[in-house]
Image (spheres, grey):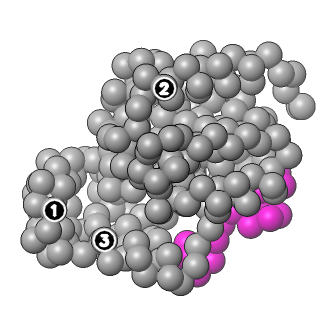
């Protein structure tokens, strides 16, 4: 089974290693993350789509299942809209699919490097390990700009979403104040073949997700998706 696992904002391929060890598949560092340089025009979803394209080519995949955590889920859905013939299914976990100015400002307040160092030094240190001591602040700033751009001009418009043909499983924690269960459920109504699963006792951070409960759920979804005939 061909599976591509996409990490969240400020994450890296390492973030999804615990999941990869259980389900297999391939993880990659998206542009601007891990050891990769921030593109001259910033961290943008257009670059992520190119990253996914490149991995399809390198793996010689004709079709694959896409799993995306948070920002990675947004990229997976965009890719499925642009390349419906290449995507067997999409699973997202904790992906923010609706933006308001209030929601944006809430997220931006978390993306202050000095505040991170003062209030969550362990997280700041983890970012330094993931992205480099001399780069992590730039990554945080670039992600803040990317979020602002996305909130101002969402890419998953109704027209774009309508082009997604594959089965989609949208997972969100009942305590996730970033993705928000009600927003996730509302977004699902615009998809032709979508299911929403609210994970009990779960907040936004990937590290807090109970993989023992999640893995059987997503493996069953992949199996069912593989049994469906492709529409093209």
* C-alpha gap between disc 3 and disc 1: 10 Å
The stretch in magenta equals 149-163
- Helix, strand or loop at disc 1? loop
* C-alpha gap between disc 2 and disc 1: 28 Å
Q: Quadrant of residue 15?
A: top left
Query: Camera-side residue: 135 or 117?
Result: 117
**Farthest residue, direction right:** 231
**Farthest residue, direction front:** 201
Q: Name the image quarter holding the N terminus.
A: top right
Residue 231, x across and y down, in percent = 89, 31
* Residue occupying image coordinates x 34% and y 27%: 18
Neighbor class of circle 1 (other Cα within 10 Å; few <14, some 14-19, many 20+) is few
Q: Nearer the viewer, mark 2 or mark 1?
A: 2
Neighbor class of circle 2 (other Cα within 10 Å; few <14, some 14-19, many 20+) is few
Query: Camera-side residue: 33 or 204?
Result: 204
Query: Camera-side residue: 162 or 208?
Result: 208
Residue, disc 2:
213
User: Would you say the residues marked 3 and 1 are in contact, meaning their CB atoms lie under 8 Å apart?
Assistant: no
* Residue occupying image coordinates x 55% and y 36%: 67
Residue, disc 3:
110
- Compared to residue 102, the image places residue 130 above or below, namely above
Question: Earlier along the polypeptide chain: callout 2 or callout 1?
Answer: 1
- Compared to residue 63, the image places residue 105 above or below, namely below
Residue, disc 1:
120
User: Would you say the residues marked 2 and 1 are in contact, meaning their CB atoms lie under 8 Å apart?
Assistant: no
Q: Quadrant of residue 212?
A: top left
Residue 55, x across and y down, in percent = 51, 34
* Residue occupying image coordinates x 21% and y 47%: 130
Is residue 87 shown to the viewer in this render? no
- Magenta includes 167? no
Query: Camera-side residue: 221 or 46?
Result: 221
């Amino acid at each position: 089974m061909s599976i591509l696992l996409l990490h969240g904002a400020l994450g890296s391929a390492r973030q999804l290693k615990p999941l990869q060890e259980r389900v297999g598949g391939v993880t990659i560092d998206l542009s601007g993350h891990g050891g990769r340089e921030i593109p001259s025009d910033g961290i943008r979803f257009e670059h992520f789509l190119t990253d996914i394209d490149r991995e399809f080519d390198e793996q010689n995949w004709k079709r694959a299942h896409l799993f995306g955590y948070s920002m990675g889920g947004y990229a997976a859905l965009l890719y499925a809209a642009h390349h419906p013939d290449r995507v067997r299914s999409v699973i997202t976990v904790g992906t923010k699919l609706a933006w308001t100015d209030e929601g944006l400002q809430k997220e931006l307040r978390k993306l202050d490097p000095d505040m991170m160092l003062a209030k969550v030094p362990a997280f700041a240190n983890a970012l330094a390990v993931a992205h480099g001591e001399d780069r992590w602040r730039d990554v945080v700033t670039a992600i803040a700009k990317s979020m602002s751009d996305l909130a101002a001009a969402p890419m998953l418009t109704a027209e774009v979403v309508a082009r997604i043909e594959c089965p989609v499983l949208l997972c969100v924690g009942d305590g996730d104040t970033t993705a928000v269960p009600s927003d996730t459920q509302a977004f699902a109504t615009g998809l032709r073949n979508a299911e929403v699963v609210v994970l009990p006792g779960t907040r936004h951070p990937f590290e807090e997700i109970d993989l023992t409960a999640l893995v059987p759920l997503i493996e069953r979804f992949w199996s069912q998706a593989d049994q469906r005939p492709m529409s093209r």
